[in-house]
Amino acid sequence: MTPSLFHFALSPACRLLRLVLAEKGVGFRLEPVRFWERPEAFLRLNPAGTVPVLKISEQAAALSETRALIEYLEEAFPEPNLIGPDAETRVEVRRLTGWFVDKFEQEVSGPLLRERVLRGLMRDGSPDAAAIRAARWNIQVHLDYIGHLAMRRRWLGGDRFSVADLAAGAYLSVPDYFGDVPWDRNAHARDWYSRIKSRPSFRPLLQDRIGGYPPPAHYADLDF
Ligand SMILES: N[C@@H](CCC(=O)N[C@@H](CS)C(=O)NCC(=O)O)C(=O)O
């Protein structure tokens, strides 16, 4: 039976799960959720009301929490290994994954998603320009950090491609959808992102469109 991923197309956490499932070659069905409306049927699956939620089969329990889900997928589908072959690599890959899931989310993708899209979908007033400005300021520091890592390592977590690259790619892809990434600022970060963007796992993300919120022309362009 095909697993179901309950998601929202512009949620970076959901995008990360889609990438991990695709990289592991696990077929899945996407079930869109308007999580901000807190649908009762969805709250029965995840009382926290957050996406992503994964149901590996119809009978299986609904699984949630992005980092727990990544660990679960690594155990349930060990190939290809996306966390690393030894303890030293794994701690670094997990640190960087947390960087994006927590820090980048709080400082950049969370506020941008809320102000640019969710406020409109929730009919919750007009966007907070100061919050958008702050997120666009914060992203510069993150882009430089990605560039710093990409200059010293083959992939962000070390020699091997890992979930740290997928996390950074998923979380950056949301501000990129809004045209909020200053790509000219850091060539190393830009080159790394173009490698991530070219992976087959990324293709469906580049085709996502949210009605009323079209992405800029470069969003789906591999030579942006
Ligand atoms: N702790 C959750 C957070 C994921 C998350 O922030 N999801 C957002 C969408 S991007 C959400 O569902 N927000 C709804 C809410 O917080 O009520 C996880 O790790 O999966």
Image (cartoon, helix red, strand yellow):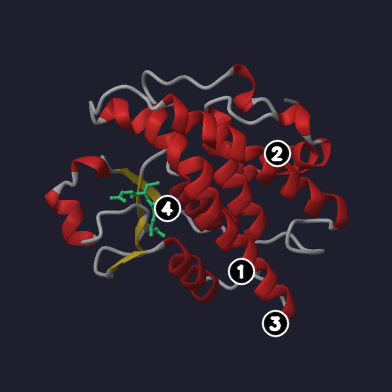
Q: Which mark is residue 94?
A: 1
Q: Give the left or right position of residue 183, taking residue 25 as reference.
A: right
Q: Nearer the viewer, mark 2 or mark 3?
A: 3
Q: Earlier in the sequence, mark 3 or mark 4?
A: 4
Mark 1 → mark 3, Cα distance in angstroms: 10 Å
Where is residue 74 shown, x and y percent of the image? 55, 71
Where is residue 96 shown, x and y percent of the image? 64, 61
Please determine whether, in this image, residue 16 is positioned above or below residue 33. below
Report the residue at 18% width, 56% height from top. 43
Please determine whether, in this image, residue 210 is positioned above or below residue 12. above
Where is residue 30 shown, x and y percent of the image? 37, 46
The picture quadrant where one finds residue 218 is top right
The residue to which callout 3 is attached is 87
The residue to which callout 4 is attached is 28
Q: Earlier in the sequence, mark 4 or mark 2?
A: 4
Q: Amino acid under label 3?
A: Ala
The residue tagged with tag 2: helix, strand or loop?
A: loop
Q: Earlier in the sequence, mark 2 or mark 3?
A: 3
The picture quadrant where one finds residue 46 is bottom left
Residue at the extreme left: 40
Report the residue at 76% width, 36% height from top. 190
Cβ of disc 1 within 8 Å of ligand 1?
Answer: no
Front position in the image: 7 or 107 = 107
Task: Work out which quarter of the rendered image holds the N terminus and state it.
Answer: bottom left
The residue to which callout 2 is attached is 198
